[in-house]
Amino acid sequence: MGYISVRNAHKEFMKDGEPLTILEDINLDIEKGEFICLLGPSGSGKSTLLNAMAGFELVTSGSITIDGEEVKAPQLRYVTVFQNYGLLPWRTVESNIELGLESKKVPKEERPAIIDKYVKMVGLDHARNRYPAELSGGMQQRVSIARALLKDAPVLLCDEPTGALDRATGDEIIRLFMKLHEQGKTLIIVTHDETVAKHCERVIRITDGRIEQ
Ligand code: ADP
Ligand code: MG
């Protein structure tokens, strides 16, 4: 059994009073430290599967476990999901990153050192006092990544993290993921983009709610 293990997972949504199968008999084992790409076309069920692993959605039948523990609710201890941006426009880069610490209730005097570490990790030291409107899409994405990283969860789930970015900026984000992989994080990236998949360690293809074997 993998560090993350999906067993016979099945997901249905009701549509016009009829059950609609979105995920069909998904089986997956992911080891600690793997850098996985979940690749598939739009509507194939990628986000649904990722959200089920994060505990935001429950599977209709089957099970998902992380480190032997069944996922029944959001697993904040294990998992951080990257959001696309979600930055507050009235707060600077630093102050948007600080949001992640506020939600963890980190004492104020400990925050500057932590913010400093993550602002540098994502290469935004020079832009720390800028507002989101003064940043490119890639820079905004990096702020949201920094804010997620400082929660220091061992598993990172990312839904189309390069979806809104041009190629060069997307590559920059991928390089950041490769760095996190080297640091031992378990990364699962959802994408419909073959070019992103090329950089991952293992590609899992999903079509019409089924994993291609
Ligand atoms: P992907 O991320 O691969 O584009 P999704 O997992 O978002 O695919 O969606 C897969 C299918 O499930 C789509 O057909 C979508 O319309 C449907 N779906 C997703 N969420 C819901 C929901 N909450 N209720 C009903 N149908 C949904
Ligand atoms: Mg999606």
Image: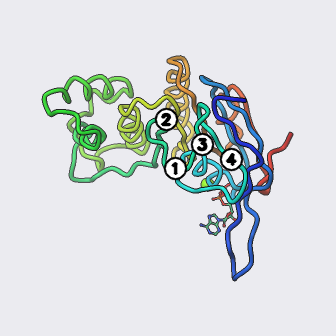
Q: Quadrant of the N terminus?
A: top right
Q: Earlier in the sequence, mark 4 or mark 1?
A: 4
On the image, numbered disc 3 is attached to which residue? 70
Q: Is disc 3 in contact with disc 1, using a CB cutoff of under 8 Å?
A: no
Q: For ligand 2, give the image quadrant.
A: bottom right
Q: CA distance from mark 3 to mark 1?
A: 33 Å
Which mark's residue is nearer the viewer, 4 or 1?
4
Q: Nearer the viewer, residue 200 or 46?
A: 46
Q: Position of residue 82 (x, y in %)?
A: 47, 43
Q: Is disc 3 in contact with disc 4, using a CB cutoff of under 8 Å?
A: yes
Q: Secondary structure at mark 1?
A: loop
Q: Position of residue 176 (x, y in %)?
A: 49, 27
Q: CA distance from mark 4 to mark 1?
A: 32 Å
The residue depicted at 69 percent of the width and 57 percent of the height is 42
Q: Is disc 3 in contact with disc 2, using a CB cutoff of under 8 Å?
A: no
Q: Earlier in the sequence, mark 3 or mark 1?
A: 3
Which mark's residue is nearer the viewer, 2 or 1?
2
Q: Is disc 4 in contact with disc 1, using a CB cutoff of under 8 Å?
A: no
Q: Earlier in the sequence, mark 3 or mark 4?
A: 4
Identify the mark at residue 78; answer none if there is no mark: 2
The kind of residue on which mark 4 rests is Ser
The residue depicted at 61 percent of the width and 24 percent of the height is 32
On the image, numbered disc 4 is attached to which residue? 63
Q: Earlier in the sequence, mark 2 or mark 1?
A: 2
Q: CA distance from mark 4 to mark 2?
A: 17 Å
Quadrant for residue 58, please give it: bottom right
